[in-house]
Image (cartoon, helix red, strand yellow):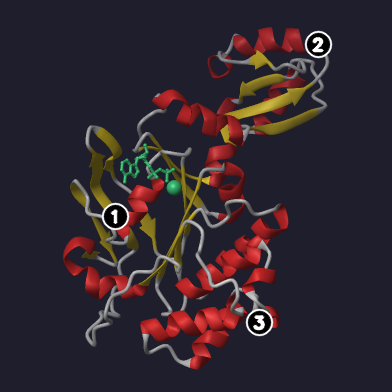
């Protein structure tokens, strides 16, 4: 079975939370004996975003998610979902959270639709129309009557997401849902996540692969060895440090000239001989004018970007990542 939080829905389940932070961890810590799996973690997931939770294997992602779902208790700290603490208000708040933790365990001999019906009957109170709705959302309507055995991995993962959506949750927490998917499967997963946020849902999605998260998420929180090392938009993660890459003739001469100015003191040539430098006034246009005035004729000026994989490795290598 899909690991699903089973709680009895209460009549007074709050529907009025309007805060901006849908999930928050406060100094969340989990220790297994002497091993600290999650260390003083402070995360914030905003309403309507697709937050990636990125970190290498063993970083503490699943442990964090299990604490967020009330499946294990923190050693210290707490998790708040929709403004309420999970440890004390779990039974009220967790029905509004849909979860898929690691691979969904599905009944392979049953159809996709019957898997959904089976879970719906355990949950109770799920109208038949909701089964149709989630099948549509995850793009499995046409295959709903086929046995799950015949599904691709991507279809099985999406069926897992469909199960997590049965109770129409506000927040969806997915642990490595793109694990093992081919590029087409990742694109389908991305499109599905965007459909969900268009419906007003918030998504928190873990991965150990930057390439997956990069395509699916709007922001990422990166953890390593149980600690938060970076929170960033994907855009900021890849944009360089305000540098420009200039291809031009007589690059050595241009370098010497640029380095004589305070804004260009860190300038260098890259491996292909292009000039890499920040610009006067931080503007590419001003850099161009400066070079032209000095008798150079740049062929191209481009904003420098960082290799995401490199960024991720630097942040998570040997636990020496900067602490945000
Ligand atoms: N039940 C457990 N008992 C002991 N150690 C555990 C347990 N669960 C996880 N760990 C350890 O906690 C660390 C984080 O694991 P986990 O949260 O599964 O990482 P991730 O999901 O990021 O790969 C790892 O070192 C793992 O071995
Ligand atoms: Mg994990």
Q: Which residue is mark 1?
A: 67
- Binning the other alpha carbons within 10 Å of mark 2 as few (below 14), some (14 to 19) or many (20 upward) gives some
Q: Nearer the viewer, residue 251 or 54?
A: 54
Asked if the residue at tag 2 contacts the one at tag 1, i.e. Cβ–Cβ closer than 8 Å, the answer is no
For marks 3 and 2 on the same chain, the one whose residue lies earlier in the sequence: 3
Q: Nearer the viewer, residue 11 or 217?
A: 11
Q: Is residue 284 above or below residue 176?
A: above
SS of the residue under disc 2: loop
| Residue under numbered circle 3 | 141
Q: Quadrant of residue 324?
A: top left
For the N terminus, the quadrant is: bottom left
Real-space Cα separation, disc 1 to disc 2, in angstroms = 58 Å
- CA gap, disc 3 to disc 1? 33 Å
From the viewer's perspective, is 102 left or right of 83? right
Left or right of 159: which side holds 202?
Answer: left
What is the tally of numbered marks visible in this picture? 3
Nearer the observer, 112 or 93: 112
Counting residues from the N terminus, which is met first, the one under dot 1 or under dot 2? 1
Residue annotated with mark 2: 250
């Amino acid at each position: 079975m899909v690991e699903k939080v089973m709680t009895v829905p209460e009549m007074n389940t709050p529907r009025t939370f309007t805060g901006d932070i849908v999930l928050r961890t406060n100094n969340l810590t989990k220790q297994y004996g002497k091993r600290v799996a999650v260390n003083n973690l402070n995360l914030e997931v905003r309403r309507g975003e697709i937050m990636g939770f990125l970190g290498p294997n063993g970083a503490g992602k699943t442990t964090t998610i299990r604490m967020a779902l009330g499946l294990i208790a923190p050693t210290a700290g707490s998790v708040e979902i929709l403004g309420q603490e999970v440890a004390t208000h779990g039974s009220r708040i967790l029905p509004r959270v849909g979860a898929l933790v690691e691979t969904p365990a599905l009944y392979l001999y049953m159809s996709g639709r019957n898997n959904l019906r089976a879970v719906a009957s355990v949950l109770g109170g799920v109208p038949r129309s909701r089964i149709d709705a989630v099948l549509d959302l995850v793009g499995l309507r046409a295959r709903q009557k086929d046995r799950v055995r015949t599904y691709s991995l991507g279809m099985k993962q999406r069926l897992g997401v469909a199960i997590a959506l049965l109770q129409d949750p506000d927040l969806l927490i997915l642990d490595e849902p793109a694990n093992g998917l081919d590029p087409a499967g990742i694109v389908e997963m991305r499109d599905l996540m965007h459909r969900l946020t268009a419906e007003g849902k918030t998504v928190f999605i873990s991965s150990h692969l930057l390439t997956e998260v990069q395509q699916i998420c709007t922001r990422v929180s990166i953890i390593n060895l149980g600690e938060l090392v970076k929170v960033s938009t994907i855009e900021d993660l890849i944009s360089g440090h305000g540098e420009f890459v200039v291809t031009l003739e007589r690059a050595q001469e241009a370098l010497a000239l640029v380095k004589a100015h305070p804004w260009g003191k860190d300038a260098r040539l890259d491996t292909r001989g292009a000039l890499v430098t920040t610009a006067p006034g931080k503007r590419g246009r001003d850099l161009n004018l400066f070079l032209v005035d000095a008798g150079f004729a740049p062929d191209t000026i481009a904003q420098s970007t960082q290799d995401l994989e490199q960024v991720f490795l630097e942040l998570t290598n040997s636990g020496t990542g900067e602490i945000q």
